[in-house]
Amino acid sequence: MIYGFDPSSVPRFVFSIPIIGDLWWFWIFWVLLFSSLYLWLSYIQEFYKRSIPYIMLELRIPREVRKSPRAMEQVFMSIHGLRNSPNDIAEKWWEGEVTLWFSCELVSFGGDIHFYMRIPKKHRNLIEAALYAQYSDIELAEVTEDYIHRLPATVKELRQNNYELFGNELRLAKEDAYPIRTYVDFEAPDEERQLDPISSMLEVLAKLKPAEICWIQILIRPTDDSWKEANETLVEELKEKMATRRYETEGGGIVMVQRTPGEVEVIEAVERNLQKPGFESLIRYIYTAPKEIYGDTFPRRGVYGAFNQYATEHLNKFAHNTKAWTRTKFWHWPHLFPKKRQRARQERIFQYYRERRMFDETTLGAILRIRPFHWYVGAQKLGKMVLNVEELATIFHPPMFLVLTGPLIKSVESRKIGPPAGLPIYGEEGEEKLPGIK
């Protein structure tokens, strides 16, 4: 033993360091194995997503819709029931099955507003039935040519045509458990005092000049109850924090402080929000116009202001996803190459809008999409949010009769009615047998 040195005082893990170094090949093997597995998973999931045929439906709104957004909430309930997910190893790792998503879109071409839904083709009959069940007068027309083809396929071509583009994604300012202001808060017993929450958005989109274009898409993917379980701790913390509090006064007395009405409202709102089915959601919009009239004030403040009507300071509200939007300045981190960062963000958000791309299912999938000057990994993490069916129905629904849809939207002029009673269905009256049966 070296004088003054006791080997027993050295932790055992120090002697294991050379052993770990000698087994470097073992650790590299496992790193490469798991990397390869998730690389394959990202590839096969992308293949699965591209193999699903989608169709576009235009919602042609009747002149008078007497139903509140509560009817659209029932439609979203039906869509949530269509949730799919891999049930075994083969479906996940060999077929690459992922939960499919749907797109609800509000589009304005120079003030001409349209409502669209992009859905998996195999779910068309079920979704049409859900819409007709709630809105019997609505007209659903399949769009043969997607409206995105009215613009060039890339930002570079768009700029060559003397157009400039702004793009943005929204996020929730607080946890998903805190609800935004919904249509329930806009309802009133008196018809004259009742408001339609989508009216502000329609007014904003109707103010566009003939050469201006604004597209808004709300991507929704049904989620399971895991988002509720993740927020159960938050509910318990709120109850403990806002429970009856006991204080001792200077004179030695005891004062009991009950929950305030505002605290009770927060707890009730959070619990009510978690009681309804949720969708993993992504709100993305782009605005483009000729450079002579282009300005990012309209999309950055106007469109965002229309979404901000759903804000409640004590609960939740929408905020800009600054890691995804196309506004970059020298004083924004990482401060270097602001123009190149802006171009990279414009190309990405324009491409993602055209593809109706949802967030990647795996972290590796997000890493593989990293581009120079815009990684987007942080934008995905910041922008992920869950909205329940009530919140989605507030944001997207056929406008009620309270909104002057005539000047804003091309409405259906004629009203659909059922066939008269007694109308022969299979043949002429008096025939006792069905056609083709002897």
Image (tube, helix red, strand yellow):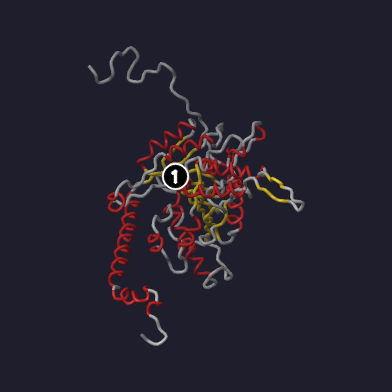
Q: Considering only vertical position in the picture, is 10 above or below 333?
A: below
The C terminus sits in image quarter? top left
Q: Residues within 10 Å of mark 1 (few under 14, many from 20)?
A: few
Viewer-nearest residue: 338 or 281? 281
Where in the figure is residue 213, as x and y percent of width and height?
53, 53
Q: Does 124 sit left or right of 396 as displayed? A: left
Q: Name which residue lies at 47% across and 61% down.
A: 155
Callout 1: helix, strand or loop?
loop
In this orientation, which residue lies closer to the viewer: 27 or 57? 27
**Camera-side residue of 168 and 243:** 243
Would residue 15 be found to the left or right of residue 118 on screen? left
In the depicted structure, whether residue 125 falls above or below residue 167: above
For mark 1, what is the residue?
225
Of the 4 image quadrants, the one containing the N terminus is bottom left
Which residue: 25% across, 21% down? 436
Residue 362 location (% of width, % of height): 39, 57
Looking at the rendered structure, the kind of residue marked 1 is Asp
Residue at the right extreme of this rendering: 251
Pinpoint residue 89: horizontal percent, then vertical percent.
29, 50
Residue 90, x across and y down, in percent: 27, 50
